[in-house]
Image: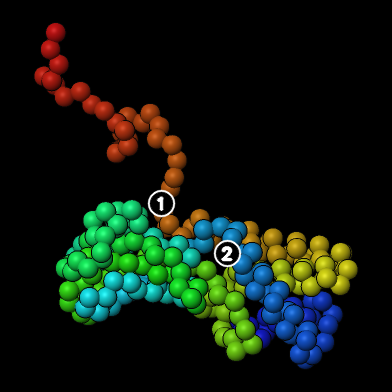
């Protein structure tokens, strides 16, 4: 589905003219609100992403991907090292003037830049260029503008969840127009799609099962304890 098609579906469900520019702009705003609502509903599998930083010699601060909500972990892929996240206080203690160079062993979250993008500091600064830092993160969906109308929504969320966008947007639009009955109907359709997505979210771990460890004699792993013969004495 294209974003333009989601806009059309929203307007059709509210009984509004689908070619009117003002209606389309308002529908797009509601679709943005719907996307944020869906993102905040669960820890969705499709929002876990990976990207890389390519180092520049003696550069300390780098900007992460535009859709980063929460960085998860960092690895110096070139040198094969896991990079722990440390605090500002740690960085101030080990390198107060921030001039040390070498192979990176620590990452610190700096905050956001003037464009609202997440920035990180590497310690020490890389002494060589073109090395790869790979990071995992949890993403969000940036707001759509008119320039995104031709975007395929598959790049933002899976097809099974896409109808929730226009159902939620139509719900909000109907509220604006004072049609509480239609708003409730769209809310019900939205919830049914979300339930489908939540079930899929649970299946993304494959055949793993989560349960409390029981008393099974043949259980493996967990907190089992066995007395080794000859290890006890009276």
- 198 to 125, vertically: above or below: above
Label 1 Cα crowd, 10 Å radius (few <14 / some 14-19 / many 20+)? few
Q: Residue at x 62, y 73 (%)?
A: 162
Q: Residue at x 22, y 75 (%)?
A: 58
57 to the left or right of 231: right
Q: Which residue is mark 1?
A: 208
Q: Quadrant of residue 26?
A: bottom right
Q: Quadrant of residue 173?
A: bottom right
Q: Residue at x 26, y 60 (%)?
A: 96
Helix, strand or loop under label 1: loop
Front residue of 146 and 91: 91
118 to the left or right of 223: right
Q: Residue at x 79, y 76 (%)?
A: 13
- 72 to 214, vertically: above or below: below
Q: Which residue is mark 2?
A: 39
Q: Can the viewer see residue 203 in this picture?
A: yes
Q: Position of residue 140 (x, y in %)?
A: 52, 68
Q: CA distance from mark 1 to mark 2?
A: 24 Å
94 to the left or right of 119: left
Q: Residue furthest top?
A: 234
Front residue of 80 and 107: 107
- 28 to 92, vertically: above or below: below
């Amino acid at each position: 589905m294209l974003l333009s098609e989601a806009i059309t579906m929203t307007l059709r469900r509210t009984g509004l003219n689908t070619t009117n520019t003002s209606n389309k702009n308002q529908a797009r705003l509601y679709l943005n609100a719907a996307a944020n609502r869906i993102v905040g509903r669960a820890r969705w599998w499709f929002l876990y992403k990976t990207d890389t930083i390519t180092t520049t010699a003696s550069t300390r601060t780098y900007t992460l991907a535009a859709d980063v909500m929460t960085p998860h972990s960092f690895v110096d892929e070139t040198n094969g090292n896991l990079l722990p996240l440390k605090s500002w206080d740690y960085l101030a203690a080990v390198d107060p003037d921030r001039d040390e160079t070498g192979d990176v062993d620590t990452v610190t979250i700096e905050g956001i830049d003037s464009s609202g993008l997440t920035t990180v500091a590497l310690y020490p600064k890389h002494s060589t260029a073109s090395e790869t830092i790979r990071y995992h993160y949890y993403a969000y969906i940036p707001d759509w503008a008119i320039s995104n109308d031709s975007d395929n929504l598959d790049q933002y969320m899976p097809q099974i969840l896409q109808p929730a966008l226009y159902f939620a947007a139509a719900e909000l639009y109907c509220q604006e127009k004072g049609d509480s009955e239609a708003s409730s109907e769209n809310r019900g359709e939205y919830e049914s799609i979300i339930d489908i997505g939540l079930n899929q979210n649970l299946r993304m771990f494959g055949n793993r099962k989560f349960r409390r460890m029981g008393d099974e004699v043949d259980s493996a792993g967990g907190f089992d304890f066995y007395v080794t013969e000859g290890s006890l004495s009276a």
